[in-house]
């Protein structure tokens, strides 16, 4: 990839004390955020990504590797774009926090 | 004992002195008023409802009276009070009964948090309850009144009370609030159903109330299983169209139409997901009521 993501060198995690509830229907998901009381409609793929982040904080690279492994027929660039857009959307909705990784982090 | 067992004079006397305790759906309402129009409209629209003893517990204590002695005669007004508080500005006294209806909606919406309350009409046929959420002007009450004339059971014209413990809808059948053009439309087809005198120049335009069917009132204790959520939209010149709506979008729209989703939080999320799981969800555009009846009957029989 030629462009570096703004999320590179970051660990992505859900906000402290946040506990999201999920319900999936036909490729769509509703997500309840106990901290804000808001409910969001997401694509199921995005919601599953958020669920993974809720299970444990993940580095950008780790998320990218997971998505790449699960989508063999899509180019790396497309996957990176999708991940960047999804994470930006999560940030707008206050569903994730970013933490800069230490310089020696994997 | 039912309200219709009292004469209008007896009812007016009780309302003036100690108030009366009416059973409306799952609630007991202790109502007092010196206004003759309240006694008259109660007897007309709530004749089939049970009167409880005044010693019984009441959920809501409501009073409707003139705000001051002079306001009984000089440009007469009415004030709605709930448990001694006055949540609204006075209205012209001609709107007293409408104010009772709106005020009671407010009492339920702000206090009955053992239900998830959705702004919607609910009607039932063959054991299947259809929920019709509606924004003003959507044609919800017109469709609701029309279906009632076709024999559907009225659970509510205004609010779906979703029980949090069993996922069923608790009926709260009350007069259907018809507005503006829908008054004449429903009058032309209402047959034996009673529609009260229109009240003009309210915040919602001209308003008239159609009494709930006696049979629906008598079946107030029969809870119903929700099986469809249908967002109606009246549109002049439109063809009848029933289009599937995704469950996710239905969820968001119902949460937005709910009076207390934000109060109940996770409990509401769980109750709503469970309900939507078992419902078919649609957008419904209509112009002619006859076509709307046929569409709803097809859904019931599907």
Image (cartoon, rainbow, N blue to C red):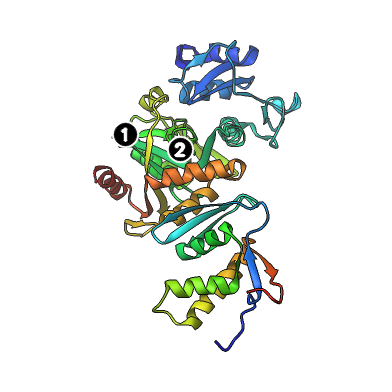
Q: Is residue B235 visible?
A: no
Q: Is B38 or A57 nearer to us in this picture?
A: A57
Q: Residue B225: x percent and y percent?
A: 37, 36
Relative to A46, residue B1 above or below: above
Residue positioned most to the bottom = A2
Name which quarter of the figure residue B236 lies in: bottom left
Q: Is residue B162 visible?
A: yes
| Residue at point 46%, 15% (across, down) | B2
Q: Residue A88: x percent and y percent?
A: 60, 71
Q: Residue B60: x percent and y percent?
A: 61, 24
Q: Is A67 or A30 nearer to us in this picture?
A: A67
Q: Kindly identify which residue carries mark 2.
A: B157
Return the mark for residue B127: 1
Q: Chain of mark 2?
A: B
Judge the density around disc 2: few (<14), some (14-19), many (≥20) Cα neighbours within 10 Å.
many
Q: Secondary structure at mark 2?
A: loop
Q: Secondary structure at mark 1?
A: loop
Residue depth check, mark 2 versus mark 1: number of the one nearer the observer:
1
């Amino acid at each position: 990839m030629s462009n570096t993501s703004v999320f590179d060198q970051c660990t992505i995690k859900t906000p402290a004390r946040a506990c999201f509830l999920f319900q999936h229907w036909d490729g769509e998901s509703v997500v309840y955020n106990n901290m804000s009381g808001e409910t969001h409609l997401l694509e199921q793929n995005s919601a599953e990504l958020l669920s993974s982040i809720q299970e444990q904080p993940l580095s950008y690279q780790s998320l990218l590797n997971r998505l790449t492994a699960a989508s063999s027929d899509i180019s790396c660039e497309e996957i990176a774009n999708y991940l960047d857009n999804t994470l930006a959307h999560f940030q707008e909705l206050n569903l994730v926090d970013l933490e800069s990784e230490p310089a020696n982090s994997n | 004992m039912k309200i219709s067992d009292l004469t209008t004079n007896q009812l007016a006397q009780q309302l003036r002195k100690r108030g009366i305790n009416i059973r409306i759906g799952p609630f007991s309402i202790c109502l007092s008023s010196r206004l003759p129009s309240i006694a008259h409209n109660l007897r007309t629209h709530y004749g089939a409802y049970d009167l409880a003893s005044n010693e019984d517990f009441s959920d809501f204590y409501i009073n409707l009276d003139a705000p001051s002695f002079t306001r009984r005669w000089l440009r007469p007004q009415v004030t709605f009070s709930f448990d001694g508080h006055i949540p609204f500005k006075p209205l012209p006294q001609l709107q007293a009964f409408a104010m009772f209806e709106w005020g009671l909606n407010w009492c339920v919406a702000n206090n009955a948090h053992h239900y998830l309350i959705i702004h919607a009409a609910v009607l039932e046929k063959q054991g299947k309850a259809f929920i019709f959420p509606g924004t003003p002007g959507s044609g919800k009450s017109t469709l609701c009144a029309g279906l009632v004339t076709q024999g559907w059971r009225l659970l509510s014209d205004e609010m779906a009370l979703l029980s949090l413990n069993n996922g069923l809808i608790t009926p709260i059948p009350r007069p259907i609030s018809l507005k503006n053009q829908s008054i004449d439309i429903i009058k032309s087809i209402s047959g034996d159903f009673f529609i009260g005198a229109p009240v003009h120049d309210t915040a919602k335009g001209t308003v008239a109330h159609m009494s709930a069917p006696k049979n629906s009132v008598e079946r107030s204790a029969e809870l119903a299983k929700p099986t469809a959520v249908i967002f109606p939209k009246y549109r002049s010149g439109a063809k009848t169209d029933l289009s599937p709506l995704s469950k996710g979008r239905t969820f968001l729209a119902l949460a937005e139409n709910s009076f207390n989703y934000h109060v109940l939080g996770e409990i509401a999320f769980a109750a709503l997901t469970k309900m939507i799981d078992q419902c078919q969800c649609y957008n419904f555009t209509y112009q002619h009521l006859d076509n709307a009846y046929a569409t709803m009957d097809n859904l019931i029989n599907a």
